[in-house]
Image: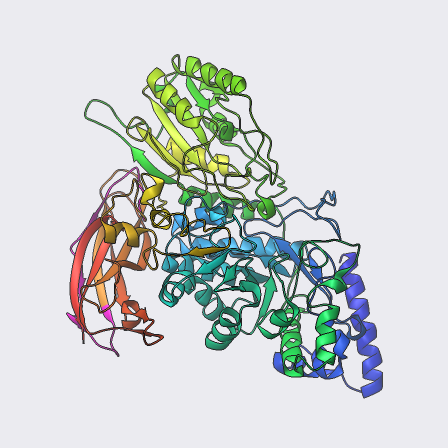
Amino acid sequence: MNKKQFLMIGLLTVTCTCLKAQNDALPVYLDENQPIELRIKDALSRMTLEEKTRLSYAQGKFSSPGCPRLGIPELWMSDGPHGVRAEVNWNDWGYAGWTSDSCTAFPALTCLAASWNTELAGKYGKAIGEEARYREKDVLLGPGVNIYRTPLNGRNFEYMGEDPYLAAEMCVPYIQGVQSNKVAVCVKHYALNNQEVWRGHIDVQVSDRALREIYLPAFQAAVQRGHAWSIMGSYNKVRGVHATHNELLNNKILKGEWGFDGCVITDWGAAHDTYQAAMYGLDIEMGSYTNGLTSEAEFGYDDYYLGKNYLKMIKEGKIPMEVVNDKAARVLRLIFRTSMNSQKGFGSMNSEAHEQTAYEIASEGIVLLKNQSSKKKAALLPIVPEKYNRILVVGDNATRNLMLGGGSSELKVKRFVSPLEGLKKRLGNRIEYAQGYTAGRPIYGNAENIPQSVMDSLRNDAIEKAAKADLVIFIGGLNKNHYQDCEGGDRLSYGLPFGQDELIEGLVKANPNVVAVIVSGNAVEMPWNNQVPSIVQSWYLGSIGGDALADVMIGKVTPSGKLPFSYPVKLEDCPAHHFGQLSYPGDSIKEEYKEDILVGYRWYDTKKIAPLYPFGYGLSYTTFDYSKPAATSKTLTATDSLQISLKVRNNGTVIGKEIVQLYIGDEKCTLLRPQKELKKFCKVELNPGEEKEITFSITPDDLKFFDDRQQKWTVEPGKFKAYIAASSADIRGTVQFEYK
């Protein structure tokens, strides 16, 4: 038992003893055998107005108070979505210097999405929840489920891709896994936080249809299916009002339509108005500074918008008590579910099981984009060690600790296996290393300027060594520096930074046997795509990602990841960029989502623009055959379901996993609809020569669209087509049916 737990038990004991002596019975709010709503009602009846309002704002950078007089404990929160952040000081952002706060870094959520494995998502959540519980955190700030709208968004690596269905299916088991530890998720960033530039004030204008069909479904699934206990409001404005205290988002949709019974928590410093915060759904205000945004005074938390001004407005009668009680009830509900829950256990940290989970996610999320072969020349991957005497590894990301930088995603890890280390373990003295380029130090909010002479020297050295090697493995891409994959700023261009394009082209000219490994949470421009025979999309793979990457490259693990977003050839092909500056990044005040519902593959399909690599795409070291799909009926009614079955066969000589995707297209509609939309998927493992049958069930809900004319979800009678696919561009079979 640690000190905090001992003191908490002592406090509860004293409280219970005193109250029991007074009332000759255990108070209802302390009795975990009582229904939670009765406990909340009882607690509220005992609290003063000041105690109720004090629940709703921070007491430190990552904690909010409970009610000490009643023995109701505080809430402790922590970044992050893919690892529990190191401890920071009470009242500033400096690291506290603990020696016991190193964590397991799990792969970034983009990698999880690329696995298309819902079972792994549950394991991920359970493992990170155990680490949060061990560190005595009550709220884990994640997962992020914002939609991938532009490849320039610096925070895309924290999210789950461009498709709302995929994001929803992957986030629900993650949430359930975390909360099984009695640690609350805080699903973020609600809503429409799809860029980092001007994030604090940009006013997003979006249609009701796009809001409902694209940007909200993952949040809705998190609430209604995942039963998330808290939601984080985003920085941006939506239709003129900041999202964190937005009546439409919080009161009407989240708490009204969806029945959310948890807490809305600000992003740090995202509140801007006391009355709106009180009336429009904000429950807990956290902040970067003591007025929530701009100034700091030691322990001045009463200056928060939900601090003394909130209390003053209540006493003046401007805010009704029913609002105060609802807000306090939501915070109490969160406390009873987490910090005051005797079933919460102790958790665990940096266990072998956690590392194994991180390894599985990383190895299943890696995507093989290209692996060229011919009759005269075999593919470079998987690497056959005996074929090569000298293997040159090139690139800053081969050795870089990619858990550093990035803002709130920065992690202090107990163990870090780099790609170079992973490859050396498996390929030994064959491996030689050349840096090739440098990205500078991982400094949050700043990009280090690298002298051109340094870049030229590193590039020339690598090219010279490449000419003498048998195989070249380039490991580059992005990192968590400012203007790359980093909170607080978007990328400045679609191309690779630090002269990497020039370096790659030089390597290929010197040696045709080049494997390019792109480490990123975003698509990148690939002007050298046709020149490089083998390309791997890696991600931020976490503590032991180097082992996972190496095992995929040598064939110990057959790659099975598929892209959770489309790879456009050029930035102008991306829908957010097609309509000019007002569509992205806006004019610094307002931004209009002019592509509407045509996000990602929906745009490329409808506009007949070929992406470089499509959504849902990924190669394997084996091949899979799909049989002709068959349906149980040619019609579907409002009360029916329709089953579509097919068989998948592994044609190769190695075990492999295939992700079978089902899209549905409406052949004729009174409103514009995409050619097709993802509605189901299944990841299946097959031994060499093995065949398995897969069955998908289709219901009328899978056919619906949001009709903004009627403000409701609906489906029109008519013909539909189900597409069985290996990617959004690789259709293996179709089934036509009619909805009556």
Picture coordinates of residue 128 (x, y %)? Answer: 56, 53
User: In the picture, which quadrant includes the C terminus?
Assistant: bottom left
Residue 441, relative to residue 84: is it above or below?
above
Q: Is residue 197 left or right of residue 628?
A: right
Q: Residue 425: x and y, percent?
A: 50, 27
Is residue 188 depicted above or below 364 in this figure? Answer: below
Nearer to the camera, 371 or 385: 371
Q: Is residue 87 above or below residue 533?
A: below
Q: Residue at x 40, y 23 (%)?
A: 502
Report the residue at 38% width, 61% height from top: 214
Residue interval drawn in magenta: 616-642
Task: Tell me: 18 left or right of 702.
Answer: right
Relative to 444, 65 lies left or right: right
Query: Is 157 colored magenta in this rendering?
Result: no
Quadrant the N terminus occupies: bottom right
Residue 263 placement (x, y as % from top left):
59, 69
Residue 619 in magenta stretch: yes
Q: Position of residue 665 (x, y in %)?
A: 23, 61
Residue at figure coordinates x 33%, y 59% from the top left = 597
Q: Is residue 255 visible?
A: yes
Q: For the view shown, which residue lies furthest in the bottom direction?
A: 24
Q: Would you say 720 lies left or right of 532 here?
A: left
Tell me what residue is drawn at x 50 percent, y 41 percent: 485
Specify whether residue 190 is in view. Answer: no
Which quadrant would residue 39 be assigned to in this image?
Answer: bottom right
Above or below — where is 471 with respect to 689?
A: above
The secondary structure that dominates the magenta segment is: loop
